[in-house]
Every structure is written in C-alpha cells, then in structure tokens.
Image (cartoon, rainbow, N blue to C red):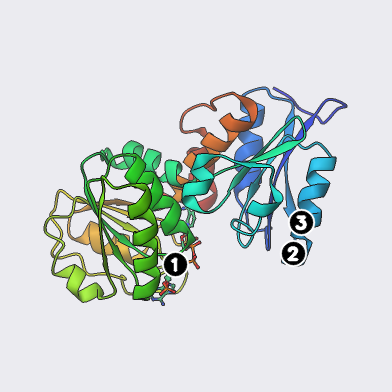
C-alpha cells in the first residue's frame, strides 16, 4: 500500500466545471491504494474558456491520464492527439491517457453502462429489445455501446424529436444490425412496453426534487429490467415505480463505478478488485447495493 506522495508518484485527475462534487477522486484513490500503485488522483476545476490551455498544461506536466466531465466531454476532442474508436462512436471523451506525450481520448461511459447492466441486473444486452429515454450526451455513448454489445432493437424516446432522429440516423450508419426507432411521445411508448426487455433512463429526469416517474411502467413485463442512469437520489421516482410493480431496477452508481474501473485499467494496466469502486460509491451515497 502506498501511503505518501514521493518523487516518483504519477498524477491522474479529473477536469470539469464544476468538479468539487465529483466522487471520482475518492473512488480512484481508494483503488490506487488497494492496488499498491504509486499514483495520486486529483480534481482540476477548469472553466470552459481555459480548456485548451489546461489540456496543453496537463500534457506539459506529463500527467499519466485524466477523466473528463461536464461540460468538456465533447469540446476536448480537437485538443487531443488521437481518439480511440470508443470516443469516436460516442462523440465524447471521458478518459484521456498520456502515451509518451501523446494524449489519447477514450470513452468508457457506454461500456461501463453495459458492464453494470450485466453485473447488477444479470441482463444480457445481446439480442435485447431496449427502450431508451433521452438523446443527449449520455444517450449517445450508451446507444453506441449497446449496439456494439449486440442489442437487436432500441426505441429512443426523447422530448425533442429532432434530437432523437438525428441520433438514430447517426447510429444507424455505424450499427446496421440494430433496429433503431424514435418517438417523442412518452405515452405512446408506455402503450408499447410489453415487448421491451430493458428500459434505460439517460435523461436528467428524476434528479433531486422530481417526485413523478418520467414513464409509467404498468405495461412492462415483470421480467423486464430497469436501469436509471441517475443516482441522486439513490431511489429515483422511476425506480420506485419499478420496485412497486415487482420489476428489478438499479440506479447509475454501478455505471459510474464501471466506467471508473475501465479508465483505471487503461491508465495503469491493472484491474481494480471487483466491487471495490462500487462499494466506495455505495458507502458515500447511502445506496443499497
Ligand atoms: P444532456 O446532454 O444535457 O441531455 C439531457 C437529456 O435529458 C436530453 O435527452 C433532454 O431532452 C432530457 N431532458 C432534460 N430535461 C427534461 C425534461 N424536463 N423533460 C424531458 N426530457 C428532459 O445530459 P447528459 O450528459 O446526457 O446526462 C443526462 C443524465 O445522465 C444526467 O442526469 C447525468 O447525471 C446522467 N449520467 C449518469 C452517468 C453515470 O455514470 N451514472 C454518466 C453520464 C450521465 P431534450 O433533448 O428534449 O432536451
């Protein structure tokens, strides 16, 4: 176990604005200590107008890597030296690795979601019929990863139809094996839930003070699963609706942990102990694992 920073300590971090709410420093530093790795992970608050200078500064300081969060995930792309295919298909970067001074952008959010669905809901995405709420940044990464993982059909439901249609067209060009449909009518979706295996909320609905579920789930099979990317509060209105109907559902803490595990391995080559990061997050958020 490494206890103190010394002359050979490597630096990892997260850039965002704001960033002080981030759970990533405690999650990664716990895992780095558990793995006996001489790294430290720190938050960097970077305002939008300082992004390019910050990226060049991190390169000049030879940091080992860093995470990227709101509002920089898309805007950072032109400032990097290379993009992994995960970042290209998601249209966003959440992880950067420094390889001999070249900054390479990855996206682990989508694969983190698929890993969390598999681990926590025991749900195989391959061949699944999925309803996905939202068409923002989180939805794009999610859909790319779900298509890569072999989803047979995804219905994208979003308040702004044009945004969903644009996203579906973009994904259809890359993933012709997945059928993609679009609706802006949540009530219409409610009436078509019977053949859905997995329902995923990628919108911000359900955060903080929301009390009503963003969708009524009475039409969903009791064998279907519900994944809510929102994790504050831990029991969102959508999850309350699912649990009330006897449908298994989980919040987005598992995704947060899984994207972190994947980033950790990209930077260090080491796989953190299974469930360690999730356990840290559950402890902080008062989540029932
Ligand atoms: P974003 O790009 O701003 O997209 C927001 C989405 O929510 C859009 O689809 C938007 O619809 C929809 N929306 C917002 N307010 C709405 C309302 N009142 N009624 C209906 N739809 C509404 O944000 P994002 O980056 O995709 O993030 C979305 C959520 O995912 C956030 O809560 C974020 O915390 C969460 N997230 C979680 C994780 C995790 O690790 N668990 C990772 C990433 C994101 P319109 O297109 O119509 O505006």
Q: Which mark is residue 47?
A: 2
Q: Is residue 23 left or right of residue 254?
A: right
Pointer 1 local density, CA inside 10 Å: few below 14, some 14–19, many at least 20: some
Mark in the foreground, 2 or 1: 2
| Distance CA(mark 2)–CA(mark 3) | 10 Å
Disc 1 beta carbon < 8 A from ligand 1? Answer: yes
Q: Nearer the viewer, residue 21 or 166?
A: 166
Residue 44 position within the rendered picture, expressed as x and y whole percent measured from the top left:
75, 52
| Distance CA(mark 1)–CA(mark 3) | 28 Å
Residue at the extreme front of the image, as rendered? 173
Q: Which mark is residue 52?
A: 3
Q: Nearer the viewer, residue 77 or 204?
A: 77
Element on which disc 3 rests: helix
Residue 25 position within the rendered picture, expressed as x and y whole percent measured from the top left:
66, 45
Q: Are marks 2 and 1 in contact (CB under 8 Å)?
A: no
Q: Check the picture and name the quadrant holding the N terminus.
A: top right
Q: Check the picture and name the quadrant holding the C terminus.
A: top left
Quarter of the image for residue 155 reads bottom left
Q: How many marks?
A: 3
């Amino acid at each position: 176990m490494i206890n103190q920073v010394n002359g050979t300590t490597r630096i990892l971090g997260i850039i965002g604005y704001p960033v002080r709410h981030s759970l990533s420093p405690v999650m990664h530093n716990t895992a780095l200590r558990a793995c006996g790795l001489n790294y430290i992970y720190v938050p960097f608050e970077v305002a939008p107008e300082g992004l390019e200078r910050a990226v060049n500064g991190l390169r000049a300081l030879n940091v080992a890597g860093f995470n990227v969060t709101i509002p920089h995930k898309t805007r950072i792309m032109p400032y990097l030296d290379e993009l992994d295919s995960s970042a290209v298909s998601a249209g966003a970067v959440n992880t950067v690795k420094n390889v001999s001074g070249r900054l390479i952008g990855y996206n682990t959010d989508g694969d983190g979601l698929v890993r969390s669905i598999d681990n926590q809901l025991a749900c195989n995405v391959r061949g699944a019929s999925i309803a996905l709420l939202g068409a923002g940044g989180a939805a794009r990464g999610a859909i790319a990863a779900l298509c890569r993982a072999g989803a047979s059909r995804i219905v994208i439901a979003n308040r702004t139809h044009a945004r969903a249609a644009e996203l579906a067209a973009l994904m259809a060009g890359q993933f012709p094996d997945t059928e993609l449909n679009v609706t802006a009518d949540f009530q219409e979706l409610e009436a078509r839930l019977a053949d859905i295996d997995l329902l995923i909320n990628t919108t911000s609905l359900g955060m903080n003070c929301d009390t009503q579920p963003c969708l009524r789930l009475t039409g969903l099979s009791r064998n279907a699963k519900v994944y809510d990317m929102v994790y504050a509060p831990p029991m969102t209105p959508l999850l309350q609706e699912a649990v009330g109907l006897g449908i298994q559902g989980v919040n987005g803490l598992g995704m947060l942990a899984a994207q972190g595990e994947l980033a950790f391995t990209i930077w260090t080559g080491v796989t953190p102990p299974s469930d360690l990061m999730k356990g840290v997050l559950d402890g902080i958020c008062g989540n029932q694992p």
